[in-house]
Image (cartoon, rainbow, N blue to C red):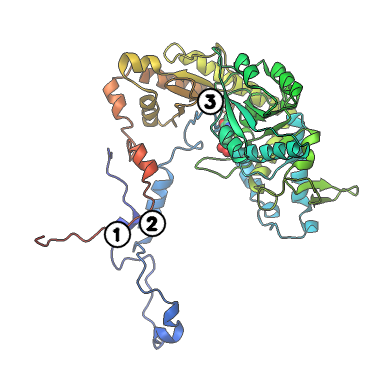
Amino acid sequence: MYKLDPPALLFESSRPGRATTYFPASDVPERPLDELIPSRFRASSVADIPELSELDVVRHYTNLSTSNMSIDSNFYPLGSCTMKYNPKRNERLAALPGLGSQHPYQDESTLQGLLAVLFELQEFLAEIAGLHAVSLQPAAGAHGELSALLVAAAYFAERGEQRAKVLIPDSAHGTNPASAHLAGFEPVTIKSDGRGLVDLEDFRAKLDDQTAVFMITNPNTVGLFDPQIGEISRLLRERGALLYLDGANMNAILGATRPGDMGADLMHYNPHKTFSGPHGGGGPGAGPIAVRDFLAPYLPAPLVGRREDGTYFLDRDRPRSIGRVRAFFGNTGVLFRAYCYIRSQGPDGLKRVAEHAVLNANYLLTLVRDLYPVPFGDRCMHEFVASARGMARDRGVRAMDVAKRLLDHNVHAPTVYFPLIVPEALMIEPTETESRETLEAFAATLREIAVEDPNRLHEAPLSTPISRPDEVQAARNLVLRWRKPEPVSHGSA
Ligand SMILES: *Cc1c(COP(=O)(O)O)cnc(C)c1O
């Protein structure tokens, strides 16, 4: 599994007696430990803390910090996740004491600036969605899905309607069916048609009076805008069912169209994708949800409200609310960065975000599609899904080999094997923040890999500390803790 020497753990570099600080001998009489700390409070054994010099520690962490692929150092075309550049300006603003040093238990009167920002963000997100009310509480996109589905459940419960099903296209993100299940619904899969869009026939066949919600990602995970959305919304309305828009791909349509205008009743945002919040490694995120007026009473409380006199308050008096879904007001650090991004772009800037996201993806698509065929669509929105099926058949080179080889070229791998409706999928999203030169260099790399010796590709990556871990073992038998090796026995047994 290791191509190069594995990086040593701090525990392995430890040498007895080595330290970062050496204290002079004590010049006061020593007192027995028992007098200072009663024995019942003391550990019975000495903890295995590595003994290291300062230089050992500094080098270890400095090297670790540069072993990662990150958007600050590498191109990161991770489809569906929108790893766009996070302006450093936002980080500086989020660290201002007026924000960074606030505490959620402070009195509201001392939090007016922060509450004003959150209130305005609610308004911006409602406007961008074309919907009426917003809760900033959910902790991430998936959590927004769950919260919004609980809102839908509360709405139907109050109407006395028994609706058990949530319809979800087979191209959807796995969080959609998971959220539907957690919210107490039965997820029902809708097929995609030959164009990669919702199969309307299958949709019509499965839409019935049991249907509570249809969840759609538009543009979808294949990078296509589904123009049937108006028809879909009309059919749902006829049946009294709700349309949910998974907003993970909002950066493709900002300012060009709005979920509310497409007929959506509820949606979530992923500020860490659309509005430049830094993410990766599982967080931190936020997942604000926006809803149509008749669903507003059920939103998680509190919302941020504004009084007649212009002061802001936490509106807790919402008797039909589904309740709280997260501590305090949500992940304010991430929300604040989204606010900064929206304010710094302005309405025209947000529209340009979408235009450039779509332009960049289409340019890249054109540069590589002869070698990496794209099964669905001649054009794409903000991302496209190529298939390595031909390569796999003709040369035994799989999407995974391409992804692994990209690491040797200092490029983060695209998303692979998702969405499931494309075999050997390579899901590529360049984002709006990349330059033409970066896109062309990436295309050249992809083209080089497409004709490289397959044996070399099977061995890639050749330049990383760990090459190809056993992924099943890594998932099933994850070892996160160092354990002291058993002393080697030289006995005769
Ligand atoms: C990322 C994503 C989600 C989940 O959002 P998180 O913020 O990661 O929880 C849901 N749907 C789609 C289409 C996504 O790309």
Task: Give 327 or 189, whichever is nearer the viewer.
Answer: 189
**Is residue 87 in view from this perspective?**
no
Residue 395 percent coordinates (x, y): 31, 16
Some atom of ligand 1 lies within 8 Å of the CB belonging to the residue at label 2: no
Question: Element at badge 1?
Answer: loop
Disc 2 marks which amino acid? Val
- For image coordinates 66% across by 15% down, the residue present is 227
Measured from the top left, where is residue 144 in percent x and y? 64, 39
Structural distance between the alpha carbons of marks 2 and 3: 37 Å
The tally of labels here is 3
Give me the disc on residue 57: 2
Counting residues from the start of the chain, the first of labels 2 and 1 encountered is 2
Does residue 284 appear in the picture of this structure?
yes
Task: Please tell me how crowded label 2 is: few (under 14), some (14-19), or many (20+) other residues with Cα within 10 Å.
Answer: some
- Cα separation, mark 2 vs mark 1, equals 19 Å
Q: Of the residues tagged 2 and 3, which is closer to the observer?
A: 3
The residue lying furthest to the right in this view is: 308
Residue type for callout 1: Lys
Query: Could you tell which of marks 2 and 3 lies nearer the N-terminus?
Result: 2
Q: CA distance from mark 1 to mark 3?
A: 43 Å
Q: Which mark is residue 429?
A: 3
Judge left or right: residue 378 versus residue 461: right
